[in-house]
Image: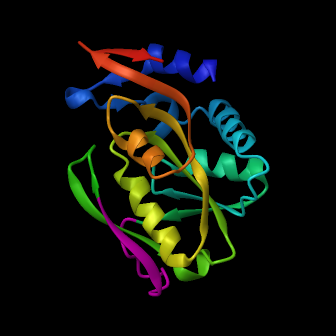
Amino acid sequence: MEELKRRILNDAIVQEGGIIQVDMFLNHYLDISLLESMGAALAKRFRGSGITKVLTVETSGIPLACFAARSAGVDAVFARRFQTGYMDRAVYSSEIHSFTVDKAYTLRVAENCLSDHDKVLIVDDILASGQAILGLLEIVAKAGAEVAGIGVAIEKEMRDGGALLRRMGLRVEALATVERVEEGRIYLK
């Protein structure tokens, strides 16, 4: 994923607290060609895993999850952060804390969207502390489904999320890995 790495180095902005803003290609203004390539790369890494669904969190993970699902030939599901009037009331839920906005959320997936027959690939845009993914893992467990692995666009290695998930025995695949951020500069692995 050399194109993703190039875009991170050229277009990402480092905000206070080491937050990496990738709005101009990944999670606000969407580079469709890049996202399609990224989705295909994640699907390829998990080919042969028996994936039946791709699961993500609204909103930033949705585009990548859709392209990964399309490439894998399966459907995508996203966990909502808020209960809506039109969402089924029977949901699997999990409480998480967002590092980026320093706010707690309840993630919800309608029970009719996941079953114990599913093998799920969890996809997200950025893996830092891993809280969103831990919430999705809890939802998958409540559904009785199996986790095929976790695919992310960018892993921030200097945060503990990826290491924690790997210690749990989970397969984690990152398309780009940020080794560190110093004085506003991003260093990739």
39 within the magenta span: no
Residue at left offset 79%, top offset 55%: 73
Residue situated in front as seen by the camera: 38 or 122: 122
Along the line of sight, which residue is nearer the eye, 8 or 42? 42
Q: Which image quadrant for residue 104?
A: bottom left
Q: Is residue 10 above or below residue 78?
A: above
The front one of 155 and 7 is 155
Image point (57%, 24%), residue name: 4
- Magenta span covers which residues? 81-96
Determine whether 50 is above or below 28 in the image.
below
x, y percent for residue 34: 64, 30
Q: Position of residue 54 (x, y in %)?
A: 63, 58
Q: Is residue 39 above or below residue 52?
A: above
Residue 55: percent from left, percent from top? 57, 59
Residue 133 sits in quarter: bottom left
Q: Main secondary structure of the magenta part?
A: loop
The residue located at (47%, 21%) in the rendering is 8
Q: Position of residue 173 (x, y in %)?
A: 57, 38
* Count of labels in the image: 0
